[in-house]
């Protein structure tokens, strides 16, 4: 089973606006108790700062999101908006100056 642990150190870290004092780590374990033990061991070994808060989440399903799809969709909408604006401008200029 895969688990995720959210760790927050005491204070805000280097810059409160970007959350330096926060992290999410993955833990592979057979059950929640083993995940908790592994988390505690990892904190002892790898985190010299004072951890103020931690939570463990059991992950039943992981879905990778295609961010390119979002950006492609946004780009298509922006292109449509620009084209519509340019067509309106073209029609306005055509009405003003006529065709040659």
Image (cartoon, rainbow, N blue to C red):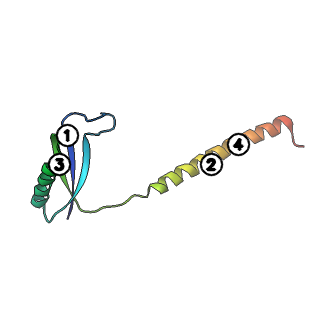
Q: Where is residue 87 in the image (x, y as percent from the top left)?
A: 72, 44
Q: Which residue is labeled 2 in the image?
A: 80
Q: Which residue is labeled 3 in the image?
A: 55
Query: Foreground: 8 or 46?
Result: 46
Q: Name the residue at 11% across, 60% down.
A: 34
Closer to us: mark 3 or mark 2? 3
What is the distance, in whole Å, between disc 1 and disc 4 at their CAs?
Answer: 52 Å
Q: Which residue is labeled 4 in the image?
A: 86
* Circles 2, 4 touching at the beta carbon (< 8 Å): no
Q: Name the residue at 86% across, 39% down.
A: 98
Element type at marker 2?
Answer: helix
What is the distance, in whole Å, between disc 3 and disc 2 at their CAs?
Answer: 45 Å
* Circles 1, 2 touching at the beta carbon (< 8 Å): no
- The answer to which of marks 1 and 4 sits earlier in the sequence is 1
What is the distance, in whole Å, between disc 2 and disc 4 at their CAs?
Answer: 10 Å
Q: Name the residue at 53% across, 54% down.
A: 72
Q: Which residue is labeled 1 in the image?
A: 9
Residue 8 position by quadrant: top left
Tell me if mark 3 has few (under 14), some (14-19) or many (20+) residues whose alpha carbon lies within 10 angstroms of its own.
few
């Amino acid at each position: 089973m895969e688990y995720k642990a959210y760790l927050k150190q005491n204070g805000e870290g280097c810059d409160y606006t970007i959350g330096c004092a926060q992290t999410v780590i993955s833990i592979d374990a057979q059950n929640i108790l083993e995940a908790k033990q592994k988390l505690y061991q990892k904190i002892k070994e790898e985190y010299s700062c004072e951890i103020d808060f931690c939570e463990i989440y059991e992950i039943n399903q992981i879905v990778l999101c295609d961010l390119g799809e979002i950006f492609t969709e946004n780009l298509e909408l922006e292109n449509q908006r620009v084209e519509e604006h340019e067509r309106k401008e073209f029609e306005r200029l055509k009405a003003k100056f006529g065709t040659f």
